[in-house]
Amino acid sequence: MTTTAPASAPAAEPKKAAPRTSPQGSGKLAALLLTPTFLVLGLVIVYPLIAALRESLYRRGEGLDESGFVVEGERFVGVDNYSAIFQGEAGDRFWNAFGNTTWFTVVSVLIEIVIGVAMALVMHHALRGKGLVRASILVPWAIPTAVSAILWRWIFTTDGVANQILNSEVLWTAEGQQAFWAVVIADTWKTAPFIGLLVLAGLQLISGDVYEAARVDGANAWLTFWRITLPLVKPALLVAVLFRTLDVLRMFDLPFVMIGQRKFAVETLSMLAYDEASNLRYGPAAAYATVLFLYVALVAFVFVKLLGADVIGEARSQKRLVKRQDKGEVQPVLPVAVAAGGTPL
């Protein structure tokens, strides 16, 4: 009896390796996808900045050249627009506006930090009517600044609510320090909820187990806030303070609508640049705007580099950690199961 050998199974075809994406192709695709964003940023940020820098080097109007002839139109003056704002009457006005801008920023932001953190704690711990409490606190932030300025101007009129409460007749919207404090009060009422909102987001990321452990250890409310809540909410608070600081440095509409133009006590750098531009002195106006831009950039640099305000979340620290892991300086973090004595999945 003859037997036939079983037919051998067909050899399995080798699996094709997945096509590897070249880094060069990925880079081209990323650049292509980001091109519209770069075009928009260049149109709304880079071009106005370059145009302002160029305008600050020119002066328009009639003048005399070196030979004594009348020159009309636009002429190049170099840094004369910058040097002029630091001298004479223009210098006095500039330093006053610079001091008002800085003082507005320091006083307003400090008050808003205290009130904003208090608002965040109230919104975070409210048990009944939490939605109503949060909505009522955030209403001032939703009101346009010009509308808010008009409302507060009514409050601070001679026969307004503020004088009725104080039982006095303070001229809040006239020249003087009372106008400065009126703007501070109005600005705090409107923008403290913004800090409260960002701090609330940071509070909601804190685990309740941390507070439970603090209660077990016998920590009181103040110690818990100072040693646990404030350090853990610091990243969100720094970002909120940074945004508010940059916002106050360019303050314009609130004092302009509420108090008025060319008021020595409340004139800011933005108002000064606007006043120069409204009088067709575009070169000096651009110089004021450029100085303000450099001031804002310096403050932003201090916050990000020196105070550690992380405006892009944890992306920067994660990127550093990955680089250190690639170099072998830091061991990769194992899953929780392995750390607890289990086996890796």
Image (cartoon, rainbow, N blue to C red):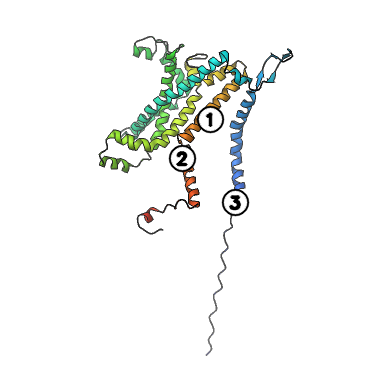
Residue 32, x across and y down, in percent? 61, 44
Residue at the (61%, 36%) spot, across then down: 39
Task: Work out whether mark 1 precedes mark 3 in sequence or the reverse, and give the earlier one.
Answer: 3
Residue at the (37%, 54%) spot, across then down: 339
Position of 26 relative to 225 (above/below): below
Tell me if mark 3 has few (under 14), some (14-19) or many (20+) residues whose alpha carbon lies within 10 angstroms of its own.
few
- Asked if disc 2 and disc 1 are in contact, CB closer than 8 Å, the reply is no
| Residue 3 left/right relative to 180 | right
Residue 239 falls in image quadrant: top left
Element type where label 3 sits in the image = helix
Task: Work out whether mark 3 precedes mark 2 in sequence or the reverse, and give the earlier one.
Answer: 3
User: Would you name the residue on which mark 1 appears?
Assistant: 297
User: Would you name the residue on which mark 3 appears?
Assistant: 23
- The amino acid marked with disc number 3 is Pro
Viewer-closest of 154 and 260: 260
Task: Work out whether mark 2 precedes mark 1 in sequence or the reverse, and give the earlier one.
Answer: 1
- The amino acid marked with disc number 2 is Gly
User: Would you name the residue on which mark 2 appears?
Assistant: 313
Residue 27, x across and y down, in percent? 60, 47
